[in-house]
């Protein structure tokens, strides 16, 4: 029994060494930094803020860079792309405390309804989150009451992050086209 265990143990060590030894020490890969993440615990953080999409006025925050393609459904604006640097505030009002900015772009990606491909980095500026960012990539069907978009990663305190964001339009002014969207972001990170 003891011999069997010893052999098993020995074989395991040989296997582990041969897998990692190949590239270690060449400068290409070093697996030791991973231990820091394996030892520390993951946590879930819930962030809530308001995203302001300002299309008109003196200082629009989202700008059309590619127009929609006229021969497709005009209502769904298929092909339209805007680049954005939208303020993220703690309260519903644009004048409330700024907690970060959403940098990215959205593209109208459906021929039959207003459905956007959202690609954004939430660059946060508050406290220990200042300088860290959460990366979102997902589908945003504008007429849906609640829209869900995946958190695909992040930087800084959000390294290795994953999660999801729920978006809900809170105000929309058809005249100025300005909208305010509430974001609830649930992120698992270290
Ligand atoms: C065009 O888009 C609108 C909504 O954006 C939709 O109601 C309508 O059915 C679409 N038309 C076609 C032909 O897909
Ligand atoms: C966030 O960090 C930047 C750069 O380090 C600094 O200039 C800024 O004042 C910080 N913002 C807040 C709200 O702490």
Image: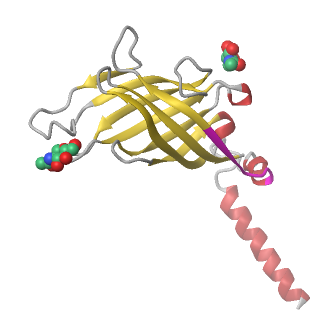
Q: Is residue 115 left or right of residue 186?
A: left
Q: Which residue is more in the foreground, 177 or 27?
A: 177
Q: Is residue 83 left or right of residue 125?
A: left
Query: So how many labels did they put on this image?
Result: 0
Q: Is residue 18 above or below residue 110?
A: below
Confirm whether the magenta stretch covers residue 46: yes
Q: Residue 56: percent from the left, percent from the top?
A: 33, 16
Q: Quadrant of ligand 2?
A: top right
> What residue sits 45% from the left and 22% below the top?
85
Q: Residue 4: percent from the left, percent from the top?
A: 83, 88
Q: Residue 116: percent from the left, percent from the top?
A: 33, 40
> What residue sits 47% from the left and 24% below the top?
86
Q: Quadrant of residue 157?
A: top right
Query: Can residue 111 be seen from the camera position used here?
Result: no
Confirm whether the magenta stretch covers residue 82: no
What is the span of residues highlighted in magenta in the rendered image?
39-47
Query: Can residue 5 be seen from the camera position used here?
Result: yes
Q: Is residue 60 above or below residue 40?
A: above
């Amino acid at each position: 029994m003891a011999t069997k265990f010893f052999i098993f143990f020995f074989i395991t060590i040989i296997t582990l060494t041969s897998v990692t030894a190949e590239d270690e020490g060449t400068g290409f890969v070093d697996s030791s930094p991973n231990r820091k993440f394996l030892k520390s615990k993951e946590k879930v953080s819930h962030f809530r803020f308001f995203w302001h999409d300002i299309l008109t006025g003196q200082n629009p925050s989202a700008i059309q860079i590619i127009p929609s393609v006229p021969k497709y459904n005009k209502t769904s604006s298929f092909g339209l792309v805007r680049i954005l640097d939208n303020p993220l505030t703690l309260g519903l009002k644009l004048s409330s405390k700024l907690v970060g900015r959403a940098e990215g772009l959205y593209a109208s990606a459906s021929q039959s309804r207003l459905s956007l491909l959202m690609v954004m980095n939430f660059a946060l500026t508050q406290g220990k989150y200042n300088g860290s960012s959460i990366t979102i990539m997902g589908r945003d069907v504008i007429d849906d009451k609640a829209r869900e978009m995946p958190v695909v990663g992040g930087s800084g305190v959000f390294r290795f992050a994953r999660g999801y964001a729920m978006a809900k339009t809170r105000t929309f002014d058809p005249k100025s086209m300005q909208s305010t969207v509430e974001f609830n972001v649930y992120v698992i990170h270290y």
